[in-house]
Image (tube, grey):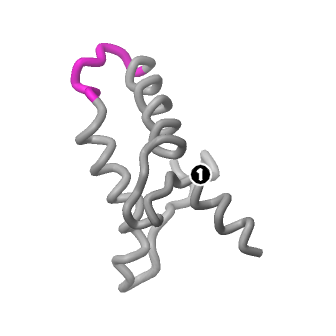
């Protein structure tokens, strides 16, 4: 089925568990901070996830990014070049 749909797996490098750490952290925060269990339709879940991703990237400050949002940190890095 995968070949028919022209899909490829996305996997971390063999033996390197750190490849998945950032996304695992994001999903952990998503599950803790979004009230997804109250959703009754897939569309409601999608809307909540879209809203959370926007919040996460633009308003949620991160200790690991020098107390900046991901968008602020990206701008900071780009201005350093």
Q: Nearer the viewer, residue 31 or 71?
A: 71
x then y, percent, for residue 34: 30, 32
Please name the residue shown 37% across and 62% down the image.
Answer: 63
Q: Nearer the viewer, residue 42 or 57?
A: 57
Residue 76 in the magenta stretch? The answer is: no
Query: Which range is magenta?
Result: 35-42
Q: Residues within 10 Å of mark 1 (few under 14, many from 20)?
A: some
Q: Is residue 53 left or right of residue 6?
A: left
Q: Which residue is mark 1?
A: 71
Please name the residue shown 36% across and 68% down the image.
Answer: 21
Please name the residue shown 33% across and 58% down the image.
Answer: 25
Q: Is residue 37 left or right of residue 70?
A: left
Among the 4 quarters of the image, the one containing residue 56: top left
x then y, percent, for residue 41: 36, 15
Q: Secondary structure at mark 1?
A: helix
Residue 39 in the magenta stretch? The answer is: yes
């Amino acid at each position: 089925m995968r070949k028919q749909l022209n899909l490829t797996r996305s996997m971390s490098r063999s033996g390197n568990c750190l490849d998945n750490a950032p996304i695992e952290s994001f999903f952990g925060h998503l599950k803790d901070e979004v009230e997804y269990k109250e959703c009754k339709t897939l569309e409601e879940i999608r809307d909540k996830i879209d809203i959370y991703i926007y919040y996460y990237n633009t308003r949620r400050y991160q200790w690991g990014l020098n107390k900046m949002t991901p968008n602020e940190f990206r701008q900071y890095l780009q201005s350093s070049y």
